[in-house]
Image (cartoon, helix red, strand yellow):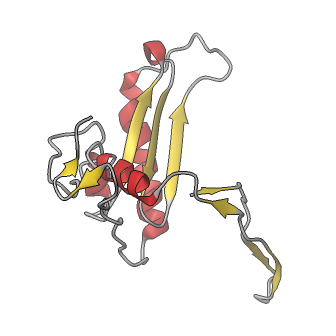
Amino acid sequence: MHCQPLPVLSITDPSGRKVAAGDPTCERVISEDVASAATDAARCPVGDQSAYGRCDGGTAEQVSRILGGRPVAGKTGSSEDASTESFVGFTPQLAVASIAANPDDPRDHVGSAVQRDVIAAVARTMASALSGEPRRDFAPPGAGAAFGADGPRGR
């Protein structure tokens, strides 16, 4: 689903009375089967396991441990020559992203040494935000045209 950015969902006054609210405008832009298959694949980089049990290592495996085994998916990223390092992590309830870069000097390659810190910052933020929230599972990949019980078919 794509939702128009809406940074504030509600505002309450000191007495707890809601004084303003907003609802994001959302629309489906890719099929549920494609979205659930992409999510399932994104579970491998963060140390979670795909629905098909085919993950064998990832680039951000500490995320699953920091979240205490809660279902999670994500993707690391590095730009050319490690000038930026980024990570996006998500659960069924929450998405968090971070990037390390030097906006004052694009020639300053922050380097892969900070990638671990970027990943940990996202994971700790997610763990804090989800503390006390119920565990939710991702929808498993469906049996749409490109997917079957054995996973994605080669094309």
Q: Residue at x 18, y 40 (%)?
A: 57
Which residue occupies the foreground of this view, 114 or 67? 67
Residue 17 image position (x, y, % from top left): 80, 88
Task: Name the residue located 71 percent from the left edge and 65 percent from the top edge.
Answer: 24
Image height check: is 155 above or below 55? above
Q: Quadrant of residue 120?
A: top left
Tag count: 0
> Along the horizontal axis of the image, is 154 left or right of 56?
right
Q: Nearer the viewer, residue 104 or 147?
A: 147
Q: Quadrant of the C terminus?
A: top left
Q: Residue at x 35, y 36 (%)?
A: 116
Residue 126, percent from left and from top: 45, 59
The residue at the far right in this view is: 19
Of residues 134 and 28, the one nearer the viewer is 28
The quadrant in which the N terminus is found is bottom right
Image point (51%, 24%), residue name: 84
Residue 63 pos. (x, y %) = 32, 50
Query: Is residue 137 shown left or right of residue 47?
Result: right
> Residue 115 at what x, y percent from top left?
39, 32
